[in-house]
Image (cartoon, grey):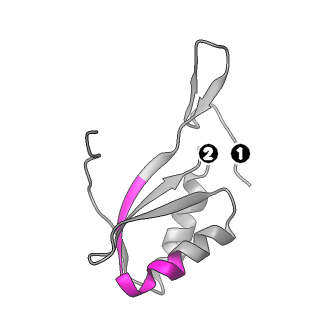
Amino acid sequence: MCVLGLDCGLSFMENGLYQMETIKKYYRIDRTSIAYVRFTLEAYDGIANMTTLDPQKGIVRMAIAPGCIAEMDAIISDLKQHILIEPVDMEPCAT
């Protein structure tokens, strides 16, 4: 389970509540492994979710829960032993 610390992605809002912001990281994975990675992340309930941005190139975005970076890094490290998964630099799209 994630432990929220002082630097955990929380920002204070004017109404006195805290807003939790996810940390977004981008990866290129073997396109045949997209479903495997998605279901693996779902097994770690609440750590992160994955969005496929380009299925042909295997580009995905991981939205990591505040305070869960270490857990997510461990999951990615383990996945790297079994499948192609590498970080990519992506600029957020302006909307």
In percent of width and height, residue 63 lies at: 49, 53
Place of residue 61 in the rendered image (x, y in percent of width and height, measured from the top left): 41, 59
Q: Is residue 37 left or right of residue 26?
A: right
Q: Position of residue 31 (x, y in %)?
A: 36, 82
Please give the residue where the numbered disc 1 appears in the rendered image: 3
Residue 1 vs residue 52, the one in the foreground: 52
> Which quadrant would the N terminus be assigned to in this image?
bottom right
Give the side of residue 1 with respect to residue 37, left or right. right
Q: Is residue 9 above or below residue 90?
A: above
Mark 1: few/some/many CA within 10 Å (<14, 14-19, 20+): few
Q: Does the segment drawn in magenta span residue 77? A: no
Sequence-earlier tag: 1 or 2: 1
Q: Is residue 17 above or below residue 27?
A: above
Which secondary structure lies at badge 1?
loop
Disc 1 versus disc 2: distance between alpha carbons?
6 Å
Residue at position x 49%, y 72% from top? 77
Near-viewer residue (4 or 34): 34
Tell me residue 70's x, y (percent). 57, 56
Q: Residue drawn 67% across and 56% down? A: 46
